[in-house]
């Protein structure tokens, strides 16, 4: 009888030990996903931060897409410049030159504030950013006076210098802004129906891209 009691006691002890081990294993399995989840959330947070701040991107195409969505296609660029809207000013820097080139006569003239002589000049775009491609390192050869042979798209390319206006009063070209010397300058051409709709210039300054010029000076008149 004692032998049977001893055997039952041993079996009971074994069952208790097995149950304890299973319980510990289940706790470890539950804890493991929590550790992994923290890591995933951290990575996702960092990725979202990068995606949500294209304004600070050194990649011009990333910045350009953001500029077009935030300002160019969201509002009328001419109106935004004329009114110095907050969205427009966010893409400018007071240390850099800013203006619009026009050709009231035979000379290319740089206009400062309010950039336009009259709000009636405001123009609108008839393209959809979702349906037009952004193409880098290339600019159309034509599209001002003759139709371009390239497909309609938004083109950009790094250029050596931004354009320089003409000082009509003193009958001489304006000086190239010293602050732009050595800076990376990007020229952007928006081509619609084989013609250039807009020409813009941006400068990379203090680790950010800034809008500097809108060029409406191309004229095909005699």
Image (tube, rainbow, N blue to C red):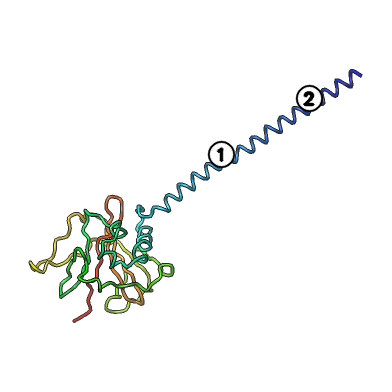
Q: Tell me the quarter of the image containing the C terminus.
A: bottom left
Label 1 environment density (alpha carbons within 10 Å; few <14, some 14–19, many ≥20): few
Q: Is residue 39 left or right of residue 76?
A: right
Question: Residue 29: image x %, image y %?
Answer: 64, 38
The quadrant holding residue 140 is bottom left
Q: Tell me the quarter of the image containing the N terminus.
A: top right
Numbered label attached to residue 208: none
Label 2 environment density (alpha carbons within 10 Å; few <14, some 14–19, many ≥20): few
- In this view, the residue farthest toward the top is 2
Numbered label attached to residue 35: 1
Q: Earlier in the sequence, mark 2 or mark 1?
A: 2
Q: Which residue is mark 2?
A: 13
- In this view, the residue farthest toward the right is 1
Question: Residue 14: image x %, image y %?
Answer: 78, 26
Q: Secondary structure at mark 2?
A: helix
Up-down: is 118 above or below 183?
below
- Relative to the observer, which residue lies in front, 188 or 93? 93
- Relative to the observer, which residue lies in front, 18 or 145? 18
Q: Is residue 32 left or right of residue 132?
A: right
* Label 2 – label 1 distance at C-alpha: 34 Å
Up-down: is 112 above or below 107?
above
Q: Is residue 106 left or right of residue 17?
A: left
Q: Residue at x 52, y 42 (%)?
A: 39
Up-down: is 40 above or below 109?
above
Question: Residue 5: image x %, image y %?
Answer: 87, 21
Q: Secondary structure at mark 1?
A: helix
Q: Residue at x 35, y 52 (%)?
A: 56
Question: Residue 160: image x %, image y %?
Answer: 24, 61
- In this view, the residue farthest toward the bottom is 222
């Amino acid at each position: 009888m004692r032998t049977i009691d001893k055997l039952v006691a041993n079996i009971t002890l074994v069952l208790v030990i097995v149950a304890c081990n299973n319980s510990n294993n289940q706790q470890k399995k539950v804890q493991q996903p929590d550790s992994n989840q923290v890591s995933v959330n951290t990575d996702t947070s960092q990725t979202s931060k990068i995606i949500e701040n294209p304004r600070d991107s050194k990649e011009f195409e990333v910045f350009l897409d953001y500029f077009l969505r935030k300002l160019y296609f969201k509002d009328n660029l001419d109106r935004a410049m004329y009114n110095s809207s907050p969205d427009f000013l966010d893409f400018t820097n007071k240390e850099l030159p800013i203006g619009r080139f026009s050709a009231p006569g035979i000379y290319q003239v740089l206009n400062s504030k309010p950039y336009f002589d009259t709000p009636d000049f405001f123009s609108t775009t008839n393209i959809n950013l979702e349906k037009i491609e952004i193409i880098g390192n290339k600019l159309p050869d034509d599209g001002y006076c003759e139709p371009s042979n390239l497909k309609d798209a938004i083109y950009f390319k790094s250029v050596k210098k931004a354009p320089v206006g003409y000082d009509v009063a003193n009958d001489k070209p304006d000086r190239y802004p010293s602050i732009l010397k050595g800076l990376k300058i990007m020229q952007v051409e928006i081509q619609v129906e084989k013609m250039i709709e807009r020409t813009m210039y941006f400068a990379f300054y203090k680790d950010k891209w800034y809008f500097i010029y809108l060029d409406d000076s191309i004229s095909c008149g005699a």
